[in-house]
Structure formats: C-alpha cells, structure tokens
Amino acid sequence: MKRALAKITGEICKKFGNDPTRMMDIAMAVQERFGCVSPEAMDEIARAVNSHRVEVESLVTFYGFLSVKPQGKVVIRLCRDIIDWMKGYESVADAMSRELGVSMGETTPDGAITLTHAPCIGMSDQAPAALVNEVVVTHLTPERGRQLVRDLRRHLDPQQLVTMVGDGNNDHPLVRSMVRNNIRMRGPVHFADFEPGSGLRRALTLKPMDVIREIKESRLRGRGGAGFPAGLKWEMAANAPGGKRYVICNADEGEPGTFKDRVLLTECTGQLLEGMAIAGYAVGSDTGIIYLRGEYRYLLPYLESVIEERLRRGFLGRDILGKKGFRFDVRVQMGAGAYICGEETALISSCEGLPGVPKNRPPFPPQQGYLGCPTIVNNVETLCCVSRILLEGAAWFASMGSPRTTGTKVLSICGDCRKPGVYEVPFGISARELIEMSEAENTGTMLIGGPCRQMIGSERFGGRICYDDLATGGAILIFNRARNKLEIAEHYLDFFIEESCGHCTPCRVGLILLKKAVHKVIEGAGEPSDLAEMRDLSNFIIRMSRCGLGQAAPNPVLGALEIFGDLSAGFVAERKPGLLPEFDLSKAVIDAEMRVGRQSKIV
Amino acid sequence: MKTVTFTIDGKIVRADKGQTILKAAEAAGIYIPRLCACKDLVPHGSCRVCSVRVNGRIQASCVQTAAEGAIVESETDELREYRRNIIDMLFVEGNHFCMFCEKSGFCELQALAYRFGITAPKYRLLYPKRDIDLSHPEVYLDHNRCILCGRCVRASQDLDRKNVFQFVERGCRKRLQVNGEALSDTDLRAADQAVSACPVGALMRKRVGYAVPVGRRPYDEVPIGRDIEKKGEE
Amino acid sequence: MAAKPRIATVSLAGCFGCHMSLLDLDERILKLAELVEFDRSPINDYKDFRARCAVGVVEGGCCTEENVHVLERFRKQCDLLVSIGECAISGGIPAMRNNIPLRECLEEAYLKSPGVYNPGGVIPNDPEIPLLLHRLYPCHEVVKIDLFIPGCPPPADAIWDALVSLLAGRPAAPAYDRLKYD
C-alpha cells in the first residue's frame, strides 16, 4: 500500500514536471486518487518536487477542499451562506445529518460519505444548494436531502443525482448539471450574439498599443469590484521590463451572493477566451491562465473542450488567425476552496503552487506578478467586455452606462425577492429599480457588492450602481425588513474569520474580537459605549489590514451600525454597578453543577 | 547610489533608493515600533506594528520603500492607539504567562507593551488550547507564546539554509508547523539563527533560562527602541 | 478634618503574593495608614465591610462562585475598584486551566496526578465548598474595573505610586521601570 502510494504520487508529480509551482494540481490529483493528502503522500511530493514536507502541508491545510485526513468517497458540502440559511439550510442540514447518522464535519463509519459545509458556492439564486464532490445540487429541501442521501448510499455516484439538467450549456454533454442560468435580463455586451473570432480579428488589424488605446478609450474598469481601469493595467504590464508576460483570468468569484461569472463561464466561454487572447496580444503575452474556483470544477471539462475547439479553429495556439508570431495558449488552474484567492496577489500565489496568501505590494502584478513576471489579472466579465469592445468599438461601449462608469454590468441578484438571477443592466441603474426588477417586497436592507462592499438601508435605495456611488463586483443581496441587520453582519464576520489567510494581525485577531463585540450586543448585553467600540475596532481593521479582505470585512458591521440608529435602544443600555451583563454566572457554574449534582446557592 | 529625501513627523530623512521606510528611519535615529521585522531577514509585513501613514495612507513601513518627497507620519495619536491595539491583540490571542516565562525581560512583545504603558489588555483573553513540543533535545517550541511573526520561518530558510518551519492552516487556525511530526524530526540545532530570531518565548533553548537576574535584563530599565533613538540624539 | 478615605482589599483566586507586596511597602505602610482607613481586608482580618469605601483592591481572578459573589460585593461597596496583579488582570497561573475541561482538571487533581492518595476515588463535594466556574475569569470580565496594577506581584513601589495618585484624584500612568508583568 505504502509502495503503491509512493509510486502513484511519484507518477502524478512527474506528470506535472516535478514542478513545485504546480503543487496545487499535484495535491488535488493525489487527493482525488487517495481521498486525502496524507503525511506519507506529503513526504513523497516533497521529495519529488525537491521541496519540504512542511511546505506541502502548508498548502494542503490552507485550502478548504484539500485534506490531510481521509474523507469519504463522497463529500457533501452544504452551502452555508446567509441566503441558504434564509432558504432553509438548517432544516436541510438536520435532515441529511440524521439520515446519515453523523454530525456536520463527520464521515460515516464505513468511510463512504462525509457531510460538511462550504461558504457560498455561487448558487444563491437556487439555494439551498450543495456540492456533492464536484456535482452541484440545488433547491434542496429536507425531503430532497434525505432522498439524496439514500440514493448516494445506493450508488455512491454523485453524477447519478442529476436527473433534470438546467438550461443553456448546463445541458451540454460535458456539463450535465442541474444548475440553471436564470438570466433575467439580456444586455448587449454579454448576452447578444457573438461571432467567434470577430473581436480577435479586429484586434489583430491594430497594433498592440492601439488595442490598449481602444480599451482605454472605452473607459472599461475592472468588473471584479475594485474598478481599476483595465487599459491602464494593460499599459503598465506592456511597458514593464521583462520577457515573459502572463494574462490571468480571475474566475474565482467567491463573494457571497455572486454567481454572474458562473453564468458567463457557462454561456460566454468563447467570448472570454477571445478577450484573453486579445489581452495577450495587447500586452505581449503568450500564456493565459484561467483560475477557476474549486466550486465550479463541474465546468472544467467543458472549458477545456472550448479551449481545444478554439485551438483547432486558430483562435488560440500558434500564429493565431494567420498572424505570424502571435501565439497564445491557455490553461485552467483549479482553485481548491479559498475565498482569499479572489484577491489578485493571493490568486497569483495560488497559481504558483503556494497557499493563497496575498503578496506585499509594491511591486504590483503588472510590474512583477506570476513567477515574478509582468502579469495582468482580469475578471471574467472584464475579459468578456474586451472582446465586445474590440468588435463594436470603444465609442459604442462608452455610450452606455454613466459618464464615469461606462458599459453594462452583470449583476447577480438574490435574497428576499421573487426573481433571483442574472441581470445585465446599464451602469447607473438605481438600487430601487433592482428591487422592482427582481420583484422584491418589503425590502429593508441591501448588500451592494456583497459583504465586502456596503450594506444600505432604504434611505439609500435611490443610489446608483456605478463606481462613484454604489460600487459592486456583481452581488446584490436583498433582505426584507424582518431580517436582523446585526445578525447579517455577524454571519458575514464568521465567513471572513473562516476565509482570512491569517497573515496579518488586524484581520486574523481583530475580526474575532469584532465578532465577539457584535455578538454581545445581539445577546442584549451591550452598552452604548460598545457601539462606539465596534466602530473603532472596525475602522482599525479596515485601515490596518494588509489586503482587501481585512480592509473590507468590517463593512457589514459599519453598515448595520449606520442603519441601526434608533433600533439600538432595544439592544444597548447603561448598566448599574454590579456584575457585567455579559458575565453569566449560571452558565459559568453549569459544568460544576452537573459534576457535583448540586445547585449554586448564589446564582 | 541614488538617494531620496522625505520626512517622518516633519523631520527630514535621507534614504538610499529602494530602502524601506523602517530602515531609513532607523538609520536616522527614529524608532518605529516593530515585531515581525528583524535585521537580516526579508520583511514579512504581517504584524503591522510598524504601520505609518505615507502621504495619508496607512502602510507597513517594513515593506514600503521610501519615496522622494513622501510625508510620513509615525508618532500620531491614531497610530499609537492602533499599534497598542495590535500588541493587545497578540497578547489575548495566545497564552502569555510572563510570570514564569524564561523570555521575560528579553521578550520583544512584552517590551513593546511596557513601552506603550499597557497595564491590562483592552480585549477579552481568548485562552486558546495550544501544544508544547518538547521532543527536541536542545530546543522547545511553545505554541502558547507564538505570535506568528514568521521570523523563525525566514531565518531558517534564508540564514540557516534549512527549512525547519512554515505556517499551516489559515485564519484563526493558522499556526507554526515543523518539517516533520515533531521538532526532533528536523535538523534544527540550538545555535541556529531561527532559534535566536524568535522575539517571544515560543522557540527557546532548553536549560539556559533565568540566567540574568531581574533588574539586569535588557528591557528592565530601558525601553525597547531606545538604542535607535539615542543615535538620533547624538 | 474630613474623614479619611476607606480602603478595602481582598484576595480571590490569587496566592496572596500581591498582599505580600503591599506589606513590602515597609515603613510606608504607616504612611498609608495615615492616608486611609483600612476597611474589609486580610490585613486587619475584617470579614465584611463596615462602611462604603473609596477604593477596593482586588488580587486574583474569579475561579469559584464565591469569588464572583465577593467581587460583586466589592464593586457595589467601593467607588473605585483596582485589579492588582496578573491573576486579577489576565488570570495568571490559575488561568492555565482555562482550555482544559473542568472534569479533566478535577480528575487530574484528585484522582490521577502522581502522589495522589485517594483510595475511595472521591472528588470533594461538601456543600460548604463553593462551586468552581468552568474557567477562570479575570476580574474585569465580571465587573467594571477602574485601574490596573500589573506584576506578579507588582513591585511595592508600583502599588504605592498607584494608590497615592489614585487617592489624590489623579491616577497616573506607571513609571517605565515600575511597570512589570513578572
């Protein structure tokens, strides 16, 4: 057994050229084969790629989908995002847990099935949802959960759970998924017809610097949320000293409540790959990497088939569309369950076979990115925009949207609304219009851009979706008036605590302390000074954290505090001298009471 | 070599091009508190104690290079409070029992807390459950005291040319790990720079504790950073 | 002449080391006695308060229900409450059990630990024995604390400085060489 492990692990490493920068792929392949990356396997990998076991362990323990300990043949990851909670996560989790006879995080005694949870898996419009190995199951109910477990026990084949397939390419033989696109509004950039090769053909008639000029004139800004001007980023990379350059597509959409890239990856795959090739031509790169989040593994065979097809048709590979010397190849790098990898430098770390820890900046990726080479990292939607801009022209693109935020935006709307799904809308649309479009009622709060952006109350529903007002990478979460804003904030703090890389102190420790402070107020033990302390701590974490995660994580708390206003009266109060309200003597002695069988006399 | 000129709290400082703000400040006799930064080691930018405002934006001075004309603020009320917060957070995150720790009086975390006049942690203590690795004949590793500064990780890789340590897990579960099942599996030696690089009592040589009497230890009378500040006064 | 301010002291889950340090004031203890009237304290062995106090000094954290009861009483009877020493401030040695379940602590102490002679396997449970809390709580997690004097124990000079400045109504930050955690 041990020799078999050594042999097969060695073969896997060899397949990836014994290259330590491909450690992600190696670890995932080993896990797929053996169900985990055991200490013995880590030793073997370290030996083969000339690294150290602790480096392999560092990688394996960082990612949610990799495991040192054996897992079941089938791993059920129930999505635990707040939208799934609202749609019944708890009762589904309870039903599945009972049916399996194990608690969350455990494996059945026969080693067949592991039940665990995952942060947002990008299915908030069809929640509650789960990943069963890489197969997505949606619209779960307790009954369906029980049935799913019974079926799995019988055949242990997740693919057999898919009885009804979704629309569009979800029906493609290489996808065969029950996921639905739920495209509610088709706009001109992404959902109009796109003739493969048309944008690329136009680009190749221009000089690379003119392609960059075209993108600059379109005033295209990054669709991932930060809104950095795409043309400027390309120009920096094109001008940076160095030979090899890289184009990376960030398909690691992990922001809770976002799922628009999933739909673009399913339906606009060609347009995306075309955008990457155009970017490669513009910045002088011959290599593209799509960093695909582990949750979207079910799309991998299809993506690879589209890459193959485009190679055959001359849209990728050597001498693209007859242009001598222009070569561009694309590979897909799978992620393995880490929200932080949506941050571009963490994503680069991950592509390099490292834990997804952000890098110190400067240098910025366009100067020194992947393997130290100039690298542009663009969101899926940004790259899709690129193809359309080259086809239709910068002026056409810039004529849409608001003056400083041009074009359209693909939004994923979910939560307390009747029509969750994907909407391509012109920038400048108001939050209120989104509420109406998605047929939401009694809306109390919205998270614009997901928890990493801002929570707004009704007084700001007139605000507009654009980089100067309500900026968003695509997530729009809607909550009705009955939802407790502080509880929403606390839920997302749990998420950020789980997903923090832990590198810097303010984020690693500060978020835990902030969660405790929020919880204290929710429990009714707060004092007016606690609200001020929560605000101070939030600002500290935002200002002192090293990367975008910590700099954004307290936003829901600040949003809730702002909307909180007069509500706070019920939660916080001045206290008389005596025991602090958060100190609960009866809880503190309960262990002892159980142990000795008598009651405290002073509680 | 090209130089740049900038200011720290109004004082004019010259730096070699590419030098970090922290190092330029140090050469000019200005002490910016720090924990994960350490002489001869590649900066890590993790503890954030050395944060300063550079042209209005908060940056870690150990990784930020000095730029011509930059206006750097260090000793402001805001930054003093934020640095204090970090020190407090590191105290409550681990289990720091100074009263019996051999590093007491030599410990940089403790010394910073003294320098900031901290009498009690501002936050609730978390009392985590952590292990102690006593397997090695010469050195022990007490995770209770580890502040995840990564100094041993870098010293082992870059100075000792070994690879004894690395971080594993993430977020609040992040912890130091050794290259093997336990410290005794590794090629660590007591004389390695990785051991002496530890600013706290996490990585300690065995059987040499308490050698200096209380009152004569480095930080008993003199605050940390005073040596750097003295250079500035000369 | 106005009545002298009253001061009370107590040791909860501590070792009385902080009280020893208080006695270590040497001849200044007489000066202190001129400045204040000692109310409830192990120094005079008064078991309960005689009057409301200006200052309460608490050594040790809370590890039993009785500690909590006494601390609550101190909070109600004293205008200002001072946590003195590491145990009161951060738990100290008694807090080393804080990440071990209570059952394991009791079994280790009374049944398993080397040198234990307990043929009946009894864990003491007299109704007179106060119940243990599931973990040790520093004082400021139980009641509001106004001033902290760290150290294990705090140097007598640190105690003197803190008390004198507090009684004068202007609590001052401790001098560098008097601020100690060990």
Image (tube, coloured by chain):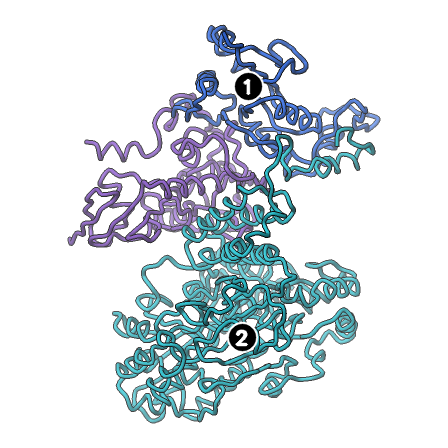
User: Are the residues flagged by discs 2 and 1 in contact, CB closer than 8 Å?
Assistant: no
Q: Is residue B168 above or below residue C30?
A: below
- Side of C133 relative to C122 (left or right): left
Q: In the drawing, what numbered circle is on residue A223? A: none
Q: CA distance from mark 2 to mark 1?
A: 61 Å
For the question of whether residue A527 can be seen, the reply is: yes
Disc 2 and disc 1 on one polypeptide chain: no
The residue that appears at 52% across and 48% down in the rendered structure is B175
Task: Say the numbered circle drawn on residue C54.
Answer: 1
Q: Quadrant of residue B220?
A: top left
Q: Amino acid at mark 1?
A: Ala
- Report the residue marked by disc 2: A434
The colour of chain C is blue
Q: Circle 2 marks a residue in which chain?
A: A
Which type of secondary structure does the marked residue at label 1 adopt? strand
Chain B as rendered: colour? purple
Local packing at callout 1 (Cα closer than 10 Å; few below 14, some 14-19, many 20+) is some
Q: Identify the chain of the residue marked 1, using the numbered disc in the image.
A: C
Q: Is residue A20 visible?
A: no
Classify residue B27 as left or right of residue A480.
left
Q: Position of residue B125 (x, y in %)?
A: 56, 38
In the figure, residue B126 lies in which quadrant? top right
Rendering quarter of residue B211: top left
Query: In this orientation, which residue lies closer to the viewer: C132 or A531?
Result: A531
Task: Tell me where residue B77 appears, x and y as whole percent.
Answer: 36, 40
Q: Which chain shows up in cyan?
A: A
> Which of A217 and A379 lies nearest the eye of the viewer?
A217
Give the percent coordinates (x, y) of residue B99. Answer: 51, 27
